[in-house]
Structures are given as C-alpha cells and as structure tokens.
C-alpha cells in the first residue's frame, strides 16, 4: 500500500485548527467580559419630597390676636416646622398630610404671606402663597363722662384700671363739677402721661377725645414707639373745646404715650380702641 503523505499531515492540521479555534474562542470570551458595563451602585435611601397643597385659616383671624391655620400636603413628618414669610412660627404635627401653625397678625393691612414647610432633614417646600383677611375687631369706647358725681371737686389719682385701660403715671381724675357735670382724666404735670390695656394685651388705638382750655395753639402727640400721630389744637380761655384725634394706626399697641406741648392741663374724655372678637 503506497504511503499517503496527507495522512501524516491530517493530525497536524487538525491540531492546528483546534488550537486556533480554542484560542480565538478564549480571546472572544475575554473580549466579551471586558465589554460588559460595570454594575451601578445602589442609590442611598432618599427622603420623600414634602409638598404643600393648600393652606386655610382655622377660625377667624383678627388683629392683635393669635390665630391658627392648617397646612395640607404630603409626606410631613414629626419635627417639621412652618415658616411665615421666612420666619419660623410655632408648629404642631397632626399627620403626614396636615400641620397646624399659629401666628399673631400685627398688621391689619396684610393680606398674604408665603408659607414654607421645613422637614427635619431633606429639602424645604417651595414657598406657597396664602391669602387671607384680617378683621379689625369691634370698636370699644371708654367714656370717662360716665363717672358722674352730683357735686364736689374730687381730684386725685385715677383707679389703676377702668374700661379695659391700665393707667400709668401722670393722670388725675378731674371733676368739672357744675360746668360739665362730668369726670375726665387730666395730665398731672400737663405735659405727658401714658396708658396701656388691661392684662398686658395689645389693642389698636383708634382715637381719643381731648378737651382744651387754652387759647394758644397746642400740639398733642400720641406714640406707641412704632406709630405716631400729632395734631395741633386750639381752644379758648372761656370754654372747653372738644377735639377728636383719630390715629389712623393699623398696628397693635401695648401702651400709648400722650404728650402735649404747653403747661396747661389737657383733659381726656373718651378713648376708643379695637377689641378683637
């Protein structure tokens, strides 16, 4: 049988083919592993984004009086705080959808505010516009003429309180006796006195009525440290001239200073202030 040289080459060729195929497969496998994208890291737990859906007054809002309002939204947690125009105010956690806050409005011309909820951790809400109406309250007049006496010229220190007013230093009762048959209060020194409101509460002073018994022009000034009202008045030396001084004030006061230019006594007949309801 003649020798076939291809028989000798066949195993060699087969080994070469297998080696080639195996190397290529291994190389392809390695290339495939290198081309796989890395596994992304697991994101950390993030707090839900709190949101406000509505704000409403819980009851009536009046100047000089603390009122409460509700903040309705989502994902509220205990420890969240409400801000009023950027300032933190007392806040109570009710539920994950409701917070309750309170604020004292000391400006009756204010009709809106920006409300924000700040969680203990996480991002605060975007400012939420809140529109509301503040009632001015009920005018209450304290008339000293109601303290009439039949006769006598009774003078002396005024009572510590009367009609919701606390009197400071500088005041006297004065009985006009038969001329006006009424009591008023007057400046003891004729230059300055002050009064506040019973219990240290705040009220809006609307007006005072003064009686002037001088023919020279005098200036009466009312001030609470923030708001001021000055009025020039003229009287006579033969009769009392009644002047009503309307303050036009919008902010609440705890005390009011009354000043008068001149040494003659000035008499106050009526004080009118706003009483919240």
Image (cartoon, rainbow, N blue to C red):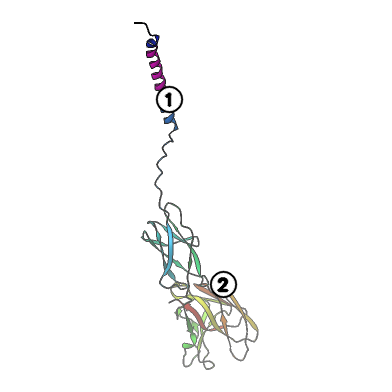
10 horizontally vs 262: left or right: left
Q: Residues within 10 Å of mark 1 (few under 14, many from 20)?
A: few
Q: Give the percent coordinates (x, y) of residue 70.
A: 41, 65
**Where does label 2 land, which residue?**
227
In terms of image quadrants, where is residue 53? bottom left
255 horizontally vs 92: left or right: right
72 horizontally vs 113: left or right: left
User: Quick one: SS at disc 2?
Assistant: loop
Q: Is 12 a magenta residue?
A: yes
Q: Which mark is residue 27?
A: 1
100 vs 31, nearest the viewer: 31
Q: Which residues are magenta?
A: 9-25
Q: Which mark is residue 160?
A: none
Q: Is 204 a magenta residue?
A: no
54 horizontally vs 208: left or right: left
66 vs 233, nearest the viewer: 66
| Distance in Å between CA atoms under marks 1 and 2 | 89 Å
Q: Residue shown at 50%/85% (left/top)?
A: 155
Placement of 179 over or under 33, stated as above or below: below
In this view, the mark in front (1 or 2): 1
Which residue occupies the extreme right position in the image?
216
Q: Give the percent coordinates (x, y) of residue 256.
A: 53, 74
Name the quarter where the N terminus is drawn: top left
Chief SS of the magenta region: helix
Q: Residues within 10 Å of mark 2 (few under 14, many from 20)?
A: some
225 vs 107, nearest the viewer: 107
């Amino acid at each position: 049988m003649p020798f076939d040289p291809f028989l000798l080459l066949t195993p060699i060729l087969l080994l070469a083919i297998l080696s080639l195929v195996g190397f290529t497969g291994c190389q392809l496998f390695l290339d495939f592993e290198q081309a796989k994208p890395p596994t992304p890291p697991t994101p950390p737990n993030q707090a839900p984004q709190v949101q406000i859906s509505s704000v409403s007054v819980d009851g009536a809002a009046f100047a000089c009086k603390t009122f409460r309002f509700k903040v309705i939204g989502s994902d509220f947690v205990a420890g969240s705080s409400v801000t009023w125009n950027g300032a933190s105010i007392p806040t109570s956690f009710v539920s994950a959808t409701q917070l309750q806050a309170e604020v004292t409005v000391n400006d009756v011309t204010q009709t809106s505010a920006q409300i924000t909820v700040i969680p203990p951790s996480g991002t605060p809400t975007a400012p939420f516009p809140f529109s509301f109406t503040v009632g001015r309250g009920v005018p209450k007049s304290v008339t000293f003429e109601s303290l009439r006496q039949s006769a006598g010229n009774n003078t002396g220190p005024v009572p510590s309180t009367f009609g919701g007013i606390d009197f400071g230093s500088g005041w006297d009762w004065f009985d006009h006796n038969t001329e006006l048959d009424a009591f008023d209060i007057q400046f003891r020194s004729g230059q300055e006195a002050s009064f506040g409101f019973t219990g240290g509460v705040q009220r809006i002073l609307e007006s005072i009525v003064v009686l002037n018994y001088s023919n020279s022009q005098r200036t009466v000034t009312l001030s609470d440290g923030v708001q001021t009202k000055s009025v020039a008045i003229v009287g006579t030396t033969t009769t009392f001239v009644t002047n009503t001084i309307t303050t036009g004030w919008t902010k609440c006061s705890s005390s009011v200073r009354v000043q008068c230019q001149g040494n003659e006594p000035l008499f106050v007949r009526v004080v009118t202030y706003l009483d919240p309801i």
